[in-house]
Image (spheres, helix red, strand yellow):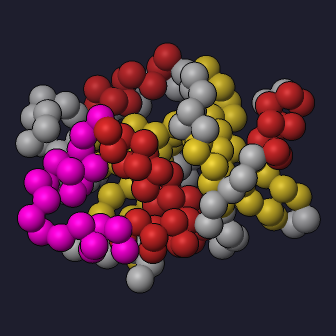
Amino acid sequence: MDRAWLNEAKSLSYRDPEVALRELREIELAIGPDVPPRIRHLRTNEFKSAREYRQAALFSLGMSRNLGVHVRFSPIEASDYDFIATWEERSTRHFAPIQLKELVPESLNSSSNIQAIIDGLTKYSSSSLTVGIFLNRRGTFDHRELRIPTLRIGALWFVFTTTQDQSQWILYGDILGQAHATTFEYPT
């Protein structure tokens, strides 16, 4: 991260993930059950930015719980990242570019898999880049079954819900370091 990048990051407006997720939940509840699932679950091109906004908020909330500090986010799609996270720790303001990936539901693409997503991360070459992979499939997750190639990124995390109503979430990682799980709740 050079000085120009840091100056740009400092100039952005950052959102509180809890507030953002509460607002999104209100919209979701107002939509009602008669709306087609692809729209309700933000699975159209028209709603891609809203889906990525929600994922950025969820990742930031998980990192807040993991770090024990308030992590905020600013959506800004650049060539290698989808948003910037910021937090303060010991009087120092930190900024981190975050790239989001997703294992989409099987109904959307049954041939996609976690390993292919991880293998695709070899194209990135920034030690300051954090990658968050959303696992949007039913089933179990065991990172020990994955083959992690040599990656030139700073950190690799997984995010997934553990409940049908998406009220309980897990942030798992850093897979490239000492991996551990952080549980958190969707704000109400």
**Residue farthest to the top?**
123
Residue 47's image quarter?
top left
Query: Can residue 167 be spotted in the picture?
Result: yes
Number of residue marks: 0
Q: Is residue 25 left or right of residue 66?
A: left
Nearest the camera: 83 or 150?
83
Image x and y of residue 37, in percent: 13, 54
Query: Can residue 114 be spotted in the picture?
Result: no
Residue placed at 47% from the left, 50% from the top?
53
Residue 186 lies in the magenta-colored region:
no
* Magenta span: 26-45
Residue placed at 12% from the left, 29% from the top?
111
- Which quarter shows the N terminus? top right
Image x and y of residue 99, in percent: 52, 37
Above or below 68: residue 15: above
- Which quarter shows the C terminus? bottom left
**Residue farthest to the bottom?**
188
Q: Is residue 71 left or right of residue 9?
A: left
Residue placed at 29% from the left, 67% from the top?
28
Residue placed at 14% from the left, 33% from the top?
109
Image x and y of residue 171, in percent: 44, 60
Above or below 171: residue 26: below
Above or below 7: residue 28: below
Image x and y of residue 121, in percent: 45, 25
Residue 75's image quarter?
top right
